[in-house]
Image: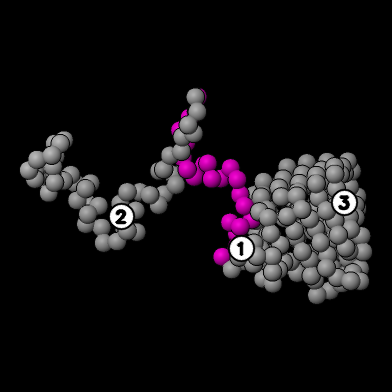
Amino acid sequence: LGRSTAGAGVVEEIICTAAGRALIAAASAAAQRTTLELTDGKKLNFLRGATGAQTRTIESKIEESVSVFDFMTQAQINDVRGGTASVDVTSAIQAALDATSILYFPAGTYHCTNTITLTGSNKTLLGEAGKSVLQFTPTNAATSFFAIGPANPQNTSTSPNTSTRVSGITFFNTLTNPTGSTVVVRKSSSVLFQNCYFWGGFYALLVVGGSNIELQQCF
């Protein structure tokens, strides 16, 4: 009951539509969201408030930007953000790299214990310069940390990486006497590092069979 007409006055009956009855009958807030189709990004639209903007689905908008956090548990995210570097996120980072061509690393310290490999072409990694830190603490001093390119560059049947951009990421090997490299570029061409930091490792940055490797404002 309420008023179906504007203004003050006596209570009037409000006719409830079938859609309204379905919403009222929903047993929980979650069920109401399902009734309203608020759980399906393909059915929710996004429209930017600007002249000429076009309506698109929320799902397609979200897919424009993939964060490495999308592949982490809340405990891993909290550890990265807190800078404690005690929860291993190696597998999560590898899964994210394998799944997308543009990957964002929010500010924080990422605890890694094994080699991470970036393969394929037209890949972009974006971090916050000086704040997005991939911290490597391997159990084997000979293990290299971050590898760009195929695992076996001598294999002529493997395709080289091309057009890779890495921006705003710090690569840090914590070992005192490592024999592995911090970053290895192998069988890759047109690799651009921007505002990156390379710390530790037997070689901080090692290029094996690569060409057109460019560093801009890197240390």
Q: Which residue is mark 3?
A: 219
| One can see residue 152 in this view | no
Q: Going 80% across and 53% down the picture, which residue do you hit?
A: 148
Q: Going 35% across and 48% down the picture, which residue do you hit?
A: 37
Residue 127 x %, y %: 71, 50
The amino acid marked with disc number 3 is Phe
Cα distance, mark 1 to mark 2? 30 Å
Residue 185 x %, y %: 85, 52
Q: Which residue is mark 1?
A: 77
Secondary structure, mark 2, is: helix
Q: Going 8% across and 45% down the picture, which residue do you hit?
A: 11
Q: Earlier in the sequence, mark 3 or mark 2?
A: 2
Please report the bounds of the magenta region as a residue range: 52-74
Crowdedness of circle 3 by 10 Å Cα count: few (<14), some, many (20+)? few
Q: Is residue 64 magenta?
A: yes
Q: Which residue is mark 2?
A: 32
The amino acid marked with disc number 2 is Gln
Q: Earlier in the sequence, mark 1 or mark 2?
A: 2
| One can see residue 71 in this view | yes
Q: Going 89% across and 47% down the picture, which residue do you hit?
A: 210
**Left or right placement of residue 10 versus residue 27 in this view:** left
- The residue furthest front is 8
The amino acid marked with disc number 1 is Ile
Cα distance, mark 3 to mark 1? 27 Å
Cα distance, mark 3 to mark 2? 53 Å
- Check residue 8 in the rendering and tell me which mark sits there, or answer none: none
